[in-house]
Amino acid sequence: MRPSFIAPTALALFFLAGGLGACGQDVLENGGVGGGPTSGSTTIATGQGGATSSSVGSGPASCPAPQMQPFTDLDQDECQLLDPSTCPEPGTGCVAQSDGTTTCVFDGGVKDVREPCADNAECKAGMLCVAGKCSEPCCRDTGEPCGAGECSVNVNVANGAHFVYFCLYPDICTPFAEPCPNNQNCVIRFNTNDAICAEEGPNAGSEGETCDFINDCVSGLVCDTPSFPSTCRYTCKTDGSSTTPGQGGCPMGQTCVSIQGFDNVGVCRP
């Protein structure tokens, strides 16, 4: 498995110069998922997620200074990521450049925050398609402007040299139940005793490989964060109705251990 160069409380994604593009994303265990094109992928981190805000709507938002948890390390020289008014031209948005600065670009779709999407191009300029919903940058300390969402998606920008946090509006799911939309997987978050829909992360691991993010494993596996080191393991059905790994059973020599918060869902452990 590839190591992540951002804190394990974040989710990563890559921006291209002059616009928003994604080749991979990381998602926190109780946080969110980064957006990206249909061909992109998402990885979910195993640490604590970001703040949840009671505020509603899209910016302008602000972060207290000094920031305990900076939302970006970009040089915001031309425009402010948290303040859409700094790009006043209709149809423009503030985005990261490959040199680590920001600029206003006319490059986006028509969908607004929380609207369903399958690609960044569907969302308004300055936004990303995060876990199937258009999302915007946010403040880690306050959670603004995520509303009922979570400020927990750390997106790698400027060719991976910098980062920006984005909102997550996760769809809650149950393993072995109804499938998630847009080819997403149902990934378990042990910190919050629930599961959310997320894209499979880049270089997702197979059974027995170590993982950094909750979507760091291929479909049918879970990043078993209570174990050390965190390891990709099969999810399973605790009622023993299946013996086939990937369909509710466990590999030989492993036992299906129940997970708090779930009925008849567990993780296979040696």
Image (cartoon, rainbow, N blue to C red):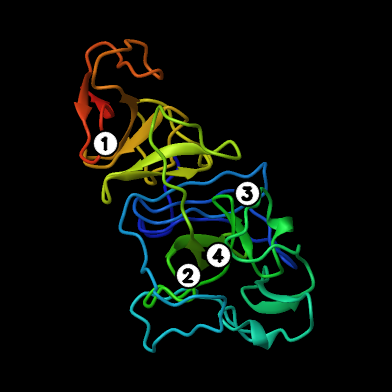
Q: Nearer the viewer, residue 197 or 98?
A: 197
Amino acid on which disc 3 is placed: Cys
Return the disc, 3 or 2, that comes first in the chain's sequence: 3
Which mark identifies residue 146? 2
Which quadrant does the C terminus fall into? top left
- Give the tally of numbered discs: 4
Residues at marks 3 and 2 touching, judged by CB atoms closer than 8 Å: no
Which quadrant does the N terminus fall into? top left
Amino acid on which disc 2 is placed: Cys
Q: Secondary structure at mark 2?
A: loop
Category of crowding for the residue at label 3, using alpha-carbon neighbours closer than 10 angstroms: few (below 14), some (14–19), many (at least 20):
many
- Write the residue at 71% across / 69% down: 125
Q: Position of residue 101 (x, y in %)?
A: 64, 77
Q: Secondary structure at mark 4?
A: loop
- In this rendering, would 120 be left or right of 235? right
Return the disc, 3 or 4, that comes first in the chain's sequence: 3
Circle 3 is placed at which residue position? 23
Q: Position of residue 233 (x, y in %)?
A: 32, 28
Residues at marks 4 and 1 touching, judged by CB atoms closer than 8 Å: no
Q: Nearer the viewer, residue 5 or 23?
A: 23
Return the disc, 4 or 1, that comes first in the chain's sequence: 4
Return the disc, 1 or 2, that comes first in the chain's sequence: 2
Which mark identifies residue 262? 1
Circle 4 is placed at which residue position? 161
Q: Position of residue 210 (x, y in %)?
A: 34, 36
Q: Secondary structure at mark 3?
A: loop
Q: Secondary structure at mark 1?
A: loop
Residues at marks 3 and 4 touching, judged by CB atoms closer than 8 Å: no
